[in-house]
Image: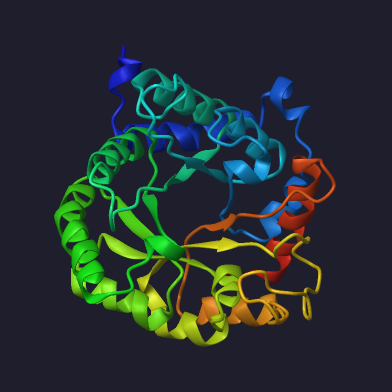
Amino acid sequence: MTNPEKLDRRGFIKKSVLGTAGLAVSTQIRTDRTYVQETKSKYPLRLSACCSSLRQRAKVEAVESAYKAGLDGVSVRFNYDLKDPASLRHRKVQLKYRDASLQYGIQINSLMVGARIKSEPNSIVWVMDSIKCARNLGAKVILLALLRSGFPSADEEYKRVIEVLKELAPKASEDGIVFGLECSGSAEEQLRIIEGVNHPSVKIYYDFFNAMHFGYEPLKEIPLLGDAICEVHVKNGRHFMSENIEGEDNPAYPGRKYNDLNHPAIAKEVKKIGYKEWLTLETSVITGDPIADTIKNVDYIRKTYNIFE
C-alpha cells in the first residue's frame, strides 16, 4: 500500500483525475453540486478561483467551495507564518489540502506567495518552502507578487530581483514548477525582468484588470507578453464580470476614470497568443454569497472566454 505522506507529484495528479471521475457517481457529494455540468462540457475552459474570492482565504474549505461553484481548480494563498497552525509550510496542512483535492476532484493549480523578493531577506526561505509545497500539492505555478512598492523602480532593484530569480528558477524547474510574476509595471518593464532572468521557469502572471488599474492597456500588452504569460487573473473590480465599469473612478489615479474592460476582445487576444492554461477568478463577492456570485461569474467567463473552441 502506498504511504499517503509519500505520494509523488505525478501520482498525485493521476489520482486527482481518477478522483474527478469518481465524483460523478458519488451521490453524497453530488447533491451539493450547484453548477450545471452541461455548461462545463460545452465550454471546456479550466477555471479556478483564488481562495479569498470564495471567502476561504488560506483555508482548506476553499477546495469544497470551488467544487460547489463549478470550478476545476483553486488557487491557494501560501501563508508562510510558521506560528500559524494553518500555514501551508506545515506538512500536516499540506496533507489536508491534498486529501480535500482528491475528495472533490479539484486541482490546486497555483499558490499565491506575497514574498517581497526585492527587499525581504527571509523571502528566499519562504519561496523555497513554497516550491516544496507546490510539488506536494500538484500545483504547477507559484504566483510571486511584485506589486506597487514591491515592483522594482531603480536599476539596483531590478538587479536584485533578477539575481534572486536566477537562483530560484532552477530549483522550481526541478519539480516542473513555474514562477508567475504578478506585476504592477508595464509589459516592457515586466519583460525586462523576464529577459534578465532568461529561464523558462520564470514567466508572467497577468491580470487584465490590474493592468488597466495601473494605467496600461491589456489589449496592447497581451500580444507583447505573448507566451511569457503562464497564468491569468480575471476580475472586474467590485462588479460581476458581465457588468460595464466604464466611467468609474480609478482609486489608483485620482481624477482618472476606468475604461470598460472589453472581455470579448481580451479573450480574442488571449486566444491569438495560443494561451491554453488556467483562467483564475480573483472576483469580488457582490451579494454576500461567494458560491452564488462565483457561479454567475463562471457562467459569463465560460461563454466569453471560449478560447478552445
Q: Is residue 126 left or right of residue 23?
A: left
Q: Residue at x 67, y 24 (%)?
A: 26
Viewer-nearest residue: 78 or 309? 78
Quadrant the C terminus occupies:
bottom right
Q: Residue at x 32, y 77 (%)?
A: 191
Answer yes or no: is residue 229 visible: yes
Q: Position of residue 157 (x, y in %)?
A: 25, 67
Query: As drawn, which residue projects farthest toward the bottom?
Result: 220
Q: Position of residue 141 (x, y in %)?
A: 38, 51
Q: Is residue 150 left or right of residue 22?
A: left
Q: Position of residue 128 (x, y in %)?
A: 24, 41
Q: Residue at x 70, y 65 (%)?
A: 236
Q: Quarter of the image holding residue 64?
A: top right
Vertical arrangement, residue 46 with respect to residue 247, above or below: above
Query: As drawn, which residue projects farthest toward the right?
Result: 287
Viewer-nearest residue: 86 or 19? 86
Viewer-nearest residue: 211 or 14? 211
